[in-house]
Amino acid sequence: MSQPKMAETSNYRTFVLWLLTLAYIFSFIDRQIMGALSPSIKADLGFEDWQLGLLKGFGFALLYTTVGIPIAWLADRYSRTKIISISVFFWSLFTALTGMANSFTSMLIARTGVGIGEAGGSPPSHSIISDLYPKEKRASALGVYSLGIPIGIAFSYILAGILVETLGWRGTLVALGVAGVILALIISLVVREPKRGQMEGDNFILEPVSISESIKTLAKIPSWWAMCMGIAWVSFGGYAVANWGVDYIVRFLPEYAPGVGNGKFRWLMLMLGLVHLVGYGAGTYYGAVITEKLAKKNISAYGWLPGAVLIVGVPALIGAFWVQNIYLHLVLITIYLVSAGVYLGPSFAAAQTLAPINMRAMSTALFFLILNLIALGGGPTYIGLASSALTEQYGEVHALRLSLTSLIVPYILSIIAFFWAAKTLPKDWAEAEARNEKMVSNNKSTST
């Protein structure tokens, strides 16, 4: 297969970036839609909070996290485009099957299948983007890709508000699955595989490395671990809130519960979608852009900026679950979402730049392994278990409120990790650049 030349890719690489972002959007719609559909599923199938927590968190994340490593190993060796298109097809199929499940066990199996498919999305996508954009533009490019998170979450709410009334929660999941299968076909037909390391110089040839060697190398980079812990613990809270926020509002304000003809539910879903799209989206994009500008003077900005904005955003989040007014709740959630989006571009850029060139897909996969075991597997599941444990004593509403309030602990861990990264980044970043330049130089000598 012929490789696209960089001279031809000014428009092409933008097209590929947005198409990969669209796939990421679909992955988050399919992932987060369970949070928006949760009240409907609970009413229909009678699941308890701990069961919903497993479906939203650990059940999805169990194989999603572990399968990502072998898929990243494949992505460092074989066609990343094919891996992405197959993955989109696979997770979309299981999203549709989730809508057909009639029991907790069958739904848990289907959600596990969605997780397996989504494991093949981000590592090869990050690797492709890194081969289309130079390191000085990589944070903003990955910031665009990371917009898949706020856009995906936003549309999971908006689509739930629009489709549940007409298609039901089952029909909504089936429709999303069909749309994803179509997207998988488009990706397989139009995205070409870029040459690995082409942004590092002409005639650059990569020698793949083993999983164990990748782990050993990355484990020796303090900043890589610090950024990983920062993103893991902030995402712990983020996934918990995204998956349980609707449940809290519906329990606290029953007039917003889903139902045929209930305009308040549609309004709530639209508002939650918009605050995620605008708040989280702005934080994600401008966080990456501002970080790149600040990093030109001091590379530590990749660490301290995400930590600093969380100091403002986390109190707003906690306060949102104690106010009595839905409008004030949405305002405080928006403030939090702006701060929570800032870490995405810098963290993913660090994962790519700090890693050796031939370990980039593996670096992202290991990032996601740790991140999702802690965050995606732990956050929603923890809230479900904690809420179930406290319900008898405090009632459903206050039990869920107390559980969400306790998220302040993982957020504090995240802030500490990001400031730790700020201390270690200058040294690690310089060593990474020197290591990659040496790899490029040795590669050129060998090729000539």
Image (cartoon, rainbow, N blue to C red):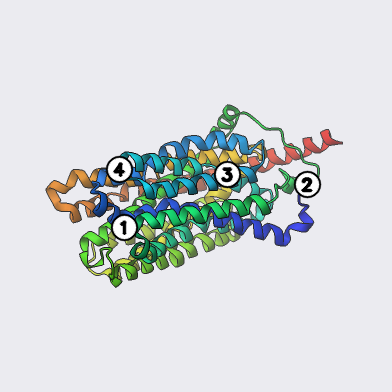
* Residue neighbourhood size for the residue with mark 3, other residues' Cα within 10 Å, grouped as few (<14), some (14–19), many (≥20): many
Count all numbered tags in the image, as a single digit: 4
Percent of width and height locating residue 423 = 51, 45
Q: What is the CA distance from the residue labelled 4 to the residue labelled 3?
A: 27 Å
Q: Amino acid at mark 2?
A: Ser
Up-down relation of residue 287 to residue 328 (above or below): above
Query: Which comes before the other along the chain, label 2 or label 3?
Result: 2
Residue at the spot of label 1: 245
Q: What is the CA distance from the residue labelled 4 to the residue labelled 1?
A: 24 Å
Query: Which comes before the other along the chain, label 4 or label 1?
Result: 4
Residue 172 located left or right of residue 130: left
Q: Amino acid at mark 4?
A: Ser
Q: What is the CA distance from the residue labelled 3 to the residue labelled 1?
A: 32 Å
Q: Amino acid at mark 3?
A: Ile
Residue 392 located left or right of residue 150: left
Q: What is the CA distance from the residue labelled 2 to the residue labelled 3?
A: 21 Å
Q: What is the CA distance from the residue labelled 2 to the residue labelled 1?
A: 47 Å
Q: Contact, CB < 8 Å: mark 2 with mark 3?
A: no
Query: Which comes before the other along the chain, label 2 or label 1?
Result: 2
Q: Choose between 342 and 89: the one closer to the eye.
A: 89
Residue at the spot of label 2: 2
Mark 2 vs mark 1: give the one in front: 2
Residue at the spot of label 4: 103
Quadrant including the N terminus:
top right
- In the image, farthest residue toward the right: 448
Mark 2 vs mark 3: give the one in front: 3
